[in-house]
Amino acid sequence: MTGAEFDIEAFLAQPLTARIATNGPTVRPVWYLWEDTALWTITGGWAALPGRVRADPAIAVVIDQCDLTTGTVRQVIARGRAELLPFDVARGRRKLSRYLGDDEQRWDARFRRYLHADPERTGIVWLRLRPESLLATDLSYDVRPATRGSPGATRGLWRATRRP
């Protein structure tokens, strides 16, 4: 059952963690950038992902949000054929600053290397998915404090009810 509609662009603009599934199956968490109606993630020679995509470019990606204090549960599932493209530093900086902030000097050295090391040496590339299908689902629910005498009331637990 699907809840209310939500703004997919605003949801995907958040720095959430995505999970990419390839044939195998294998699933891995990744940081992503939603830009130009595509999901972009950094990968390279240090990972199995490029080889898996070359062997079979069909992938699925899920990006979700689950906040038990507010009852917000949303997900976007994208499916399609991934492409491996040359790395470009400007897009890399936009992607990494979403998760790490604008001050590059505060980033862990490995993330700075992504931007400044020679791509020929590191094998860094973009994985781009222009979704053939994009499914957004809102499974959010109302959260209310447990009432006195109800199970969990003395433990301070919350009671959940599904939003219409």
Image (cartoon, rainbow, N blue to C red):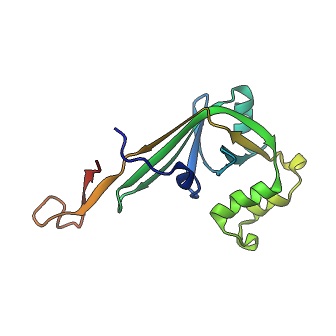
Residue 70 position by quadrant: bottom left
Left/right of residue 47 with respect to residue 67 in the rendered view: right
| Vertical comparison of 63 with 16: above or below | above
Q: Residue at x 80, y 58 (%)?
A: 90
- Asked if residue 153 lies left or right of residue 13, the reply is left
Q: Depth check: 10 or 67 in front?
A: 10
When the figure is inspected, residue 123 is found, relative to residue 131, above or below; the finding is: below
Q: Quadrant of residue 45?
A: top right
Question: Which residue sits furthest left?
Answer: 149
Q: Give coordinates of residue 94: x percent, y percent.
A: 72, 59
Which sits in the foreground, 72 or 99? 72
How many tags in the picture?
0
Question: Where residue 135 sits: x, y (%)?
Answer: 50, 38
Against 25, is 101 above or below? Answer: below
Q: Position of residue 66 (x, y in %)?
A: 42, 54
* Quarter of the image with the N terminus in it: top left
For the point 89% across and 53% down, which residue is it?
118
> In x, y percent, where is residue 139?
37, 46
